[in-house]
Amino acid sequence: MTSEIVIDVQQKEISIALMEDKRLVEYQTEPRSASFTVGNIYMAKVKKLMPGLNACFVDVGYERDAFLHYLDLGNQFNSYEKYLKQVQSDRKKLYPFAKATQQPELKKDGSVQTTLSVGQEVLVQIVKEPISTKGPRLTGELSFAGRYLVLIPFGDKISVSSKIKSSEERARLKQLLQSIRPKNCGIIVRTVAEGKRVAELDTELKVLTKRWEDAIVKVQKTQKRPQLVFEETSRAVALIRDLFNPTYENIYVNDADVYNEVKQYVTLIAPEKAGIVKLYKGSVPIFDNFNITKQIKSSFGKTINFKHGAYLIIEHTEAMHVVDVNSGNRSRKVEGQEANALDVNLGAADELARQLRLRDMGGIIIVDFIDMNLAEDRQLLYERMCQNMQQDRARHNILPLSKFGLMQITRQRVRPAMDVNVEETCPTCFGKGTIKSSILFTDQLERKIDYLVNNIGIKRFYLHVHPYVAAYINKGVWSLKRRWQMKYGTGVKVIASGKLAFLQYEFYDKDKQYLDMQEEIESK
């Protein structure tokens, strides 16, 4: 299996696609200004105590207060509290972390009322992004994740991933890290650290320790609350950190700054693979070039076709996701209804496992498979689903089919499910139902070009239009595009973009920065 990552960096958002054998399996998109990412650490203030829930609401600067349960404060909450007081007592000289003293662990049967007070400052980390009407979920047990290791301030032990089975390797890693472990810090050894040399582990440990030290310096120097003291690495780097493996063939990026950031990180963790990071310079949109736009359009939405006419219907409610499996108009197998039902269900299990990763669906998922009478067929379907989900990094639990033919799946949810609207609102009438004559569309485009060249003074730019419109503009020897270039200069470039609706268009300057021409449309 070959894996590739394609990163599309736009002015307002960044999108990341993971391809396995040219098939889209993971997709994430978010505004470039997005904050409140999982892993961010804040110096925040307690806003309100909730004794009935044994929890409190904390102000981290989000529109809704974040939620912090007493049990999420962490065993070392008392140690953090004392050290933070020592740090903030002197704004000029930082109290060394190595001199911090471990305090008694927080009682598990304690109360939030006796531990915290309104207005108290706490150091917290986001473990779940805001979802729907809920604010972020917090923890007081901080951690700094790297490729091979996770650093836990005030931790007292070294833990090795249970996926490393060899007892000799586990003992080797523990012994190595015991010799380089910073004082007052615990370490979790991740699975990919198996077989790594001490120099590689020591280099990453120093990077993680520096992040913790920089966060404490921010706490000491500033008094503004709430305050972001540590920001998780960018989505592109964070995804590569968690997913990266030696089988990757290519990582394509269409932005020079993000390319340098990704290249620097890959060079740090795997110098021999630095060459797989490539800067995409093509004029065709990067997602169109790798056939990702079409896969996004066909893979999201309510109805998902998967093979021979069979399809899934996916509904999202407040409490859970519900999936219905339908055989559609597929031809019946000669072997009979049972064999047909098994074939459709196995195909549905393959597609559903992909959809869970692709949409990052979390919480409770209920799947209504086609009824099967034979117990061995039901067991085969359960085993197929478990096998497909082995590629999923999120924690999950799958139950066998119930007597009603339902499969129950729970999957870890740390951010909102990816919901891409594949239905297109008419860009000309905005859903009103009437549009200007489409034969005048190219005249409208020419007015825009004339305005850019002669009024604003932009001589070189890209015009993105629907592929059908691009074909019309480019057709013939004496094409419309050729006439525009003769009239306004050869800096006019027409690009076919699959993400645009039929009469939709976008202008970009020579540096691929979006030019907003919508306001001028309204004034015409």
Image (cartoon, rainbow, N blue to C red):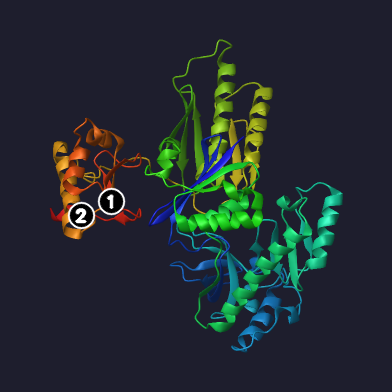
- Tags 1 and 2 touching, CB below 8 Å: yes
Which is nearer the eye, 404 or 434?
A: 434
Which is nearer the eye, 180 or 171?
A: 180
Res 296 seen here: no
Q: What is the x, y in percent for residue 98?
A: 74, 78
Res 148 seen here: yes
Which is nearer the eye, 261 or 82?
A: 261
Q: What is the x, y in percent for residue 188?
A: 73, 60
Amino acid on which the number 1 mark rests in the picture: Phe
State which quadrant residue 220 falls in: bottom right
Which of the two discs, 1 and 2, labels the residue nearer the N terminus?
Answer: 2
Rendered position, 415 above or below 214: above
State which quadrant residue 123 falls in: bottom right
SS at mark 2 in the image:
helix
State which quadrant residue 4 falls in: top right
Horizontal side, residue 85 vs residue 189: left or right: left
User: Residue drawn at (60%, 51%), measured in percent from left and top?
Assistant: 274
Q: Residue furthest top?
A: 334
Quarter of the figure with the N terminus: top right
User: Residue drawn at (25%, 35%), measured in percent from left and top?
Assistant: 474
Q: What is the x, y in percent for residue 352?
A: 54, 35
Q: CA–CA distance between discs 1 and 2?
A: 9 Å
SS at mark 1 in the image:
strand
Horizontal side, residue 493 vs residue 377: left or right: left
Amino acid on which the number 2 mark rests in the picture: Leu
Horizontal side, residue 449 vs residue 37: left or right: left
Q: Please give the residue where the numbered disc 1 appears in the rendered image.
A: 461
Q: What is the x, y in percent for residue 510?
A: 32, 53
Q: Please give the residue where the numbered disc 2 appears in the rendered image.
A: 452
Q: Which mark is residue 140?
A: none
Rendered position, 419 above or below 477: below
